[in-house]
Image (spheres, rainbow, N blue to C red):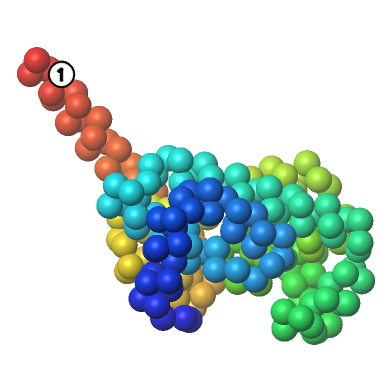
Amino acid sequence: MPDFGHELAMLEPWLHHYGIVAVFIILTFESCGIPLPGESLLIVAAMLSGRGDFSVGSLFLSAWAGAVLGDNIGYLIGRILGHDLLLRYGGKIGLNAARIGRIEAIFARYGPVAVGFSRFFSVLRQLNGIVAGTMKMDWWRFLIFNALGGALWVLVWTMAGYYFGAHAADGIGFIRKCGFWGVIVVSIVLIVILAYGYRHRILARWRRDKMN
């Protein structure tokens, strides 16, 4: 995978200049099928949130909204233009007919579950909505699983960047090696950490109130 230190040096000043709105815009375009560094951008923005530069809540909402909006635009494009769209333009992003066939086979086999977890994998993340649209997946099912999967993806990488900083990039490599189970393990670990931190904050507030 690309050197994360280089990506950090490149993306940090850009984020400082344009703010969280840049996360929303980049994730929207990436989710439409355009190859952009959305995952790295989200982690860097989360690192800056951990330093107090951004509100982590605002970052989560912006990233989630951009991801879901972009996927639904992609779904609409795929629904209207169909399978020929992938065959005609897939070569521009390194997709031949065989790779497109494998991606479509994943969606045909796992349906909405593929929509929910595809965001954690490169290429699938960018083509999620388009492929679901070309396969005429029911839009409501797509919307629900896409929104849930997008929320999980944003939560995982926002919390990873927020708590672990640059080490969160190692998690990307871990997920790429372990696939589906990597997603499950990382998600559970981060949710436990988040729950523990929230519980600790609530207890600290309760103790302060009790002392007063």
Residue occupying the point 25% across, 30% down: 202
Residue for point 48% across, 53% down:
18
Question: Relative to 26, is 136 on the left or the right?
Answer: right
Residue 12 x %, y %:
39, 63
The answer to whether residue 126 is above or below residue 72 is: below
Q: Position of residue 194 (x, y in %)?
A: 34, 46
Where disc 1 sits, the SS reads helix
Q: Which residue is mark 1?
A: 209
Outermost front residue: 17
Residue 27 is left or right of residue 172, and the answer is: right
Going by the numbered disc 1, the residue's amino acid type is Asp
Say how many tags the image has.
1
| Furthest-left residue in this view | 211
Residue ID at (52%, 42%):
61
Q: Quadrant of residue 211?
A: top left
Query: x, y percentage for residue 37?
Result: 55, 68
Q: Can you say which quadrant of the picture contains the C terminus?
A: top left
Q: Is residue 148 visible?
A: no
Whether residue 179 is visible, yes or no, is yes
Residue plotted at (46% across, 46% down): 59
Image spot of residue 159 (x, y percent)? 38, 52
Q: Is residue 6 above or below residue 41?
A: below
Report the side of 132 relative to 176 (left or right): right
Quadrant of the image occupied by residue 139: top right
Instruction: Identify which residue, 116 or 30, lies in the foreground.
Output: 30
